[in-house]
Image (cartoon, rainbow, N blue to C red):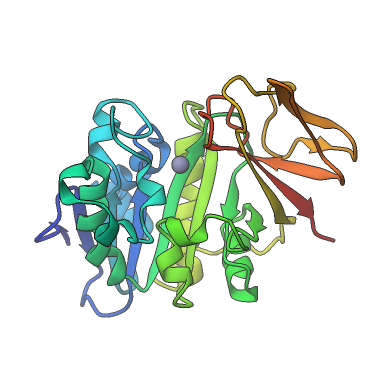
Amino acid sequence: MLTPHPAVESVWELRAEGGSGPRVGVLGAIHGNEVGGLRALERLMTDAGAREAELAKGTLVLIHGNPRATAERRRYTAGGTDLNRLFDFGWVDRLAREAWTYEHHRAHALRSVLGDLDALLDLHSASQPTVPFAIAASTAEGIALGRATGCRVTHGWDGPGMLMDHVSIGHLVARGRPALSVECGQHQAPETSEHAWRILLRFLGALGVSRHPPETNAAPTYRLFGRVVKPTRHFELTKPFASFDVLAPGDVLGRGEGVTIAVEEEAHLLLPTPTAARGEDLVYLARREP
Ligand SMILES: [Zn+2]
């Protein structure tokens, strides 16, 4: 049965018959313009989609992450901030409430929703072309869960200076609960929403809340070793890279205003973002694991 969340807008609950079992969150469009995951949520909320998902137990908590940014067709609202960097909640005590943007209020509203979950899948898409890949906890269980979705698996996002503490799944990963973010393809690519749907069904199957078979063929895994923040305003990547493009030792990643960045070892690129502003994440570097 589908019901709106009693307290938080743009959140719904889809309960299996009987209703007992884990609470499994599915997040779409935490970045407003990443609508592939949102289409998967909408599909779950139709009769046919719910039938296709065949819940065996538990409750799905369906969360439209940033509805206002979706209406504005932007990553985050004009004048706002990246919602998926606010989930460490350190700012609640540091930042005066008058200075909160829409995203601060939204993160605050979602705090208890995420805190109540036993598992979470956060569906994203990327500005540049990519095959789908999972962002997993660096544990055997996290990597296995990523593989069960049929995607390439990346991990190491919880290393020093990395992002895991600030993102939606960080809260669950820190507590040892199953949680994944998945990049399902490029924002507007027609196949991205279909990828999101298949990934969602396999995720539910892997958790045992639906009867969908998880993927058993092991896709390659990658461990992050670097995060490159755009160093200067006019710094540019050497070319329009896609995720999983490979640089050889010594290859130049980008340059601008007297700064040149080259890689010292073979590097697989993840989420190159040419539109990043100075100080924002430009690209991540990973090693392919044997
Ligand atoms: Zn995203």
- Could you say which is closer to the camera, residue 227 or residue 36? 227
Left or right: 178 as drawn, with respect to 30: right
- Could you say which is closer to the camera, residue 202 or residue 231? 231
Above or below, 79 against 176 in this view is: above
Residue 214 at x, y percent in the picture? 56, 64
Residue 145 at x, y percent in the picture? 57, 67
Q: Quadrant of the N terminus?
A: bottom left
Left or right: 220 as drawn, with respect to 57: right
- Could you say which is closer to the camera, residue 183 or residue 163? 163
Residue farthest right in this picture? 249
Above or below, 144 against 11 in this view is: below
Residue farthest bottom in this picture? 20
Name the image quarter holding residue 230.
Answer: top right
Left or right: 21 as drawn, with respect to 234: left
Above or below, 147 against 198 in this view is: below
Residue 239 at x, y percent in the picture? 73, 21
Residue farthest left in this picture? 6
What residue is shown at x 44% (from left), y 48% (from top)? 123
What residue is shown at x 42% (from left), y 37% (from top)? 36
What residue is shown at x 68% (from left), y 31% (from top)? 242
Q: Can residue 100 be seen in this view?
A: yes
Left or right: 192 as drawn, with respect to 44: right
Name the image quarter holding residue 147.
Answer: bottom right
Name the image quarter holding residue 266.
Answer: top right
Residue 142 at x, y percent in the picture? 58, 69
What residue is shown at x 24% (from left), y 39% (from top)? 67
